[in-house]
Amino acid sequence: MRGSAAALVPALAVAAQTTPALTSLPWVRRTLTPTLAGISRRPHVALTYDDGPDPVSTPLFLRLLARHGRFATFFLLGEHAARYPDLVLHMTELGHEVAVHGWDHRCLAFKRPGRLVDEVKRTKDLLEDITGKSVRWYRPPYGVLTAEGLNAARAARLRTVLWTAWGRDWTSTATPDSIRRTVLRSQKPGGTVLLHDTDRTSAPLSWRNTLGATSELLDHWARQVVPVGRLSEHWADPGVDLRLRLVTAEQRES
């Protein structure tokens, strides 16, 4: 009996470590963990981008968002933020929000035990040193969570947020129209949208399709008078919604 129990310990340890990865399944997180999925009771869309900063593509997204008067949350990789600090600072100067996507893009399930706490904190500290602003959010690469990943985020005082809708924009077959349709198929008021402002971990030049889709989505949400913005606004005072709607209506009339 003792031998059987001893043999069970490693299996239980693996289960405890990997069970949070079930939240990578959209229906699981939307149903069981709505806050983790990025669901708000407000009729607001949180627009988020992963894998930057990229000096080639990210500035084009910043210009597009500026033309529409919209802001987003960018989940950045520490190793690239360290290479392009001026771009990271520029993003926040424009009013966008930066968040932690990890030091690199390796799946948490394959990380060597003990490394993650340092990597998450190091990325957060780097972004705060560059921007002079506090960083609040964490999203693991591929949306795959582990127990160590959750603990690393808590230790860094970060809130983990995944998404409710994505555009599958990283694939080689994606088009602006397919990305737009995929997002709108599952995007509901109060949801969080995941896109990518770089092809660093995606099909080559896939960001061009995402850029086109972003323009179409912003036009669609403007016609629907849907508030769109950063995660920091997503769980804000509901009274903000009325002000955002009034501003959007004024923009449409001008």
Image (cartoon, grey):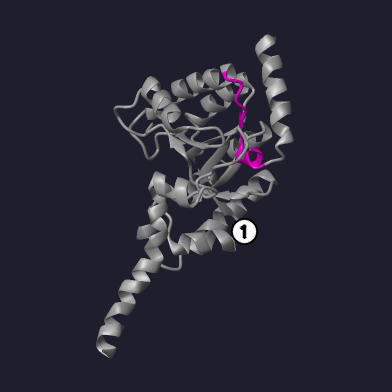
Q: Is residue 223 above or below residue 100?
A: above
Between 190 and 248, the residue placed more toward the observer is 190
Residue 231 is covered by the magenta coloring: yes
User: Per the image, is 58 magenta?
Assistant: no
Residue 83 is at least partly visible in this image: no
Left or right placement of residue 143 versus residue 128 in this view:
left
Q: Is residue 173 visible?
A: yes
Q: Which image quadrant for residue 184?
A: top left
Q: Position of residue 109 (x, y in %)?
A: 36, 59
User: Which is more toward the observer, 56 or 128?
Assistant: 128
Relative image position of residue 211 (x, y in whole percent): 46, 24
Residue 223: percent from left, percent from top: 57, 16
Report the quarter where the N terminus lies. Answer: bottom left
Residue 181 in the image: above or below residue 254: below
Viewer-nearest residue: 86 or 137:
137
- The residue that label 1 is drawn on is 157
Q: Residue at x 72, y 40 (%)?
A: 237
Question: What residue sits 64% from the left and 22% below the top?
Answer: 69
Specify the amino acid type for callout 1: Arg
Tell me the quarter of the picture where residue 87 sits: top right
Q: Which residues are magenta?
A: 224-235
